Image (tube, rainbow, N blue to C red):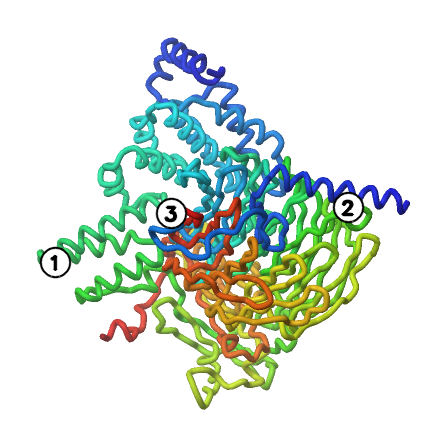
Amino acid sequence: MQRKTLHSAVASWSVIVVALAVCGADWLQFRGTNGASVALGPAPPASWEEDENVAWRVNLPGRSVASPIVVQGKVITTSSSGVDQDHLHVLAFDVETGEQAWHRQFWATGRTLTHPFSAVAAPTPASDGERIFAFYSSNDLICLDLDGNLLWYRGLAFDFPKAGNDIGMSSSPIVADGTVVVQIESQGESFATGIEAATGETRWRVDRARSPNWASPMVMPGRPGGKTTVILQSGSGVVGHDMVSGKELWNFELPCQTTPSLAVHQDRILVPTSEGLTALDLPAAATAPSLAWNSSQLNPYPASPVVAKDRVYAVNSSGVLSCADLNDGKRLWQVRIGGRHWSTPVVAGNRIFCVNADGQAKVVELGESGTIIGTSDFGEAIKGSPAVADGALYVRSDNYLWKIADN
Amino acid sequence: MTRLTLPTNLSLLAAALLCPALAARPAHADPPADLQSALETLRAVQPKGQGHRGAMQAWKTISQADADQLPMILAGMQGANRLADNWFRAAVETIAQRHQQAGGKLPVAALEKFLADTTQAPRARRLAYELIAGVDQTAETRLITPLINDPSLELRRDAIALGLKSAEAELKDGDPDSVAGQFQRLFAASRDLDQVKAVAEKLRDLDQPVDLPKHMGFVLRWHLAGPFNNADGVGFDQAYPPEDGVDLEATYQGKVGDVRWQEYTTADDFGIVDLNEAFNRPKADKGSGYQLTTEHKGAVAYGYTVFDSPEAQPAEFRIGCINANKVWLNGRLLTANEVYHSGMEVDQYVATGRLKKGRNEILVKVAQNEQEESWAQRWQFQLRVCDHLGTALLSQGRTARRPSATDLR
């Protein structure tokens, strides 16, 4: 049995490795293909200006606080427009030229009220490398192929009209093992559901606490028994479910934050809580996570934590970037980068790219200390997290999508 | 070229030659059988993934259609639900994009004919317009200007925006009295809140009478009863006596003593009933907030009004409420929303019902929770009665509103 489990685990990791190889340096979902906000390949430039290191910039319709993703040579981004923000857009641009490959529009089937700070296009789309899963605050889930052909359309608030809140929803979908998982939690109605990627049909649905929550689900591959676990975070803790069947596998009570999302790195789960940052361990052979450490010195908010190699990075609500040892949570250094960070930073090479809500970007060189090596200004409010692929940084505001790359 | 393109067109031509009556009908009237079947499959898409597998195949069929068939496909949106609308839209955009990328031209004349047909689905007509506007920069001025009363609220919105621009330009040079008539027409036609506000402001600048609550259909005159207990949220599901029938002379056991119905008329332009004000909640010593008080926190209030409808008719009851709420029409629960302090907007919750001719009773329940944060102290609601387009439905004998501060400027 143990042998079978090990084989399954190896097989699952192999699938992940192959997927990463096939997708190259694609950035397939919120906080990247690995979900830890770490990019493969070279680092983008440390600074840029209008005529330096800006490969292209394109105009966009509507509004968005979502991150772009990069799939098979296309940058995909979502917008919402119209007086009620009920027009939902999915746009694809060529990574090399910035030319629009296609643009699809839909009408929201769910609630479209949001706080003016947010937008209906708040969740970041996800991709399995073949399909795009665009999700919105209205709980519309749209599946397109890479050429913009509609494969299926689910109106999850059409199915469950009480799900949603008028501040706006922002939990991003995640896809693995042929299953798309979305987490919809509000006072009206709350659930998480796994939907078959190929057909749009529901594989499972679990009720969740009726309380507002903006955190995104996260995948942990290879456990238990080589299967993939999707971890759902809410105010009362984190719960592991089998990705394909939805079966609850474990439940760990924690006073979790409901805005920043947990990150996963190998056996470790990093959970933002009201007490700081909590690390849980979940080795492949374990049936439930155990507490590794808790740090009150790390307070990722509202951006999510980032994990790269043996370091964890967190930007707090005062605009201070902290670096800690992943093994024990001990803080190693801090640097003030300033501003409010809704956008989760991205690590590429030995740099971390941080963009605050005013559109000011700081690039920090990572080492024994954190050194700001570049400061740039997008000149637009930015709340979505950057995407990084093949040494290029992709950032969007309401009005623009930029590609930042060495000239 | 698939069966749906050249052969289909030939079959249509043949059918038209054989049947003069058919030839006289619009090009979008008769899709061929296989396209018709695919359109029906799309229209049959239901919530929770029902009909997906068939729709996926049908979508592929439809998306391979020729651009000349776009009006037929758009016509297929008639009667479709909101999910199916999106399958249709994606097919239409895919066809148009493929055709244009291949150097083809869209059937603009047929699309214009479709746009002009107000019996077609409003969203389909809007989509037809977007296709036209994508290839014809004159489309807006040619086609939109006359549409200020269009059943498509999006087309209407664009027409009102154009009308506003034109009226404002005339106002700079012309006679304000003559332009006022234009603004009045635009006001009467406007349905989107931002446009209603913008036109109202212009009219007020011109010293023209504006009755915003009447235009929107907000109920201003209420009888209020409360507070009843909602500690720990128990009051939302607890049916207090008003839910069993309203007796305006009754005395109820409330949260902190006897409760009687009291008349209340709001002077707010958008019909907001401030229950803190109505129930005399004391203000805080500092700032503009209220004190935390037992009787006003963890409390339920009821609002009751009588609506005299000139005829039996369907109606929408649109409530904006920062607190948990329920709405009944003639004793039938229309909507229940157990959501606290998650924003408040005009038309936040839309419930449908049917007014009977004559006297109708509307009862609203508004439950405040016990959160202590400064942003969780509002206890308010607003309700309007209108048709599906947002056109006000007014109770017969509705009396003139009390003037608001803005009217008295």
Q: In this figure, which residue is indicated by the disc labeled 2? A: A227
Residue occupying image coordinates x 53% and y 35%: A146
Residue at image x 44%, y 54%? B357
In this view, the mark in front (3 or 1): 3
Q: Which mark is residue B172?
A: 1
Which of pointers 3 and 2 lies earlier in the amino acid sequence? 3
Q: In front here: A345 or B69?
A: A345
Q: Secondary structure at mark 3?
A: strand
A125 and A269: which is toward the camera: A269
**What crowding class fits label 2: few (fewer than 14 Cα within 10 Å), some (14-19), or many (20 or more)?**
many
Residue B198 visible from this viewpoint: yes
Of residue B352 and residue A339, the one placed in the foreground of this image is A339
From mark 3 to mark 2, how far is it between C-alphas? Answer: 41 Å
**For discs 3 and 2, the disc positioned in front in the rendered view:** 3
Q: Residue B298, relative to residue A285: is it above or below?
A: below
Residue labelled with disc 3: A57
Residue A238 x, y percent position in the rendering: 71, 61
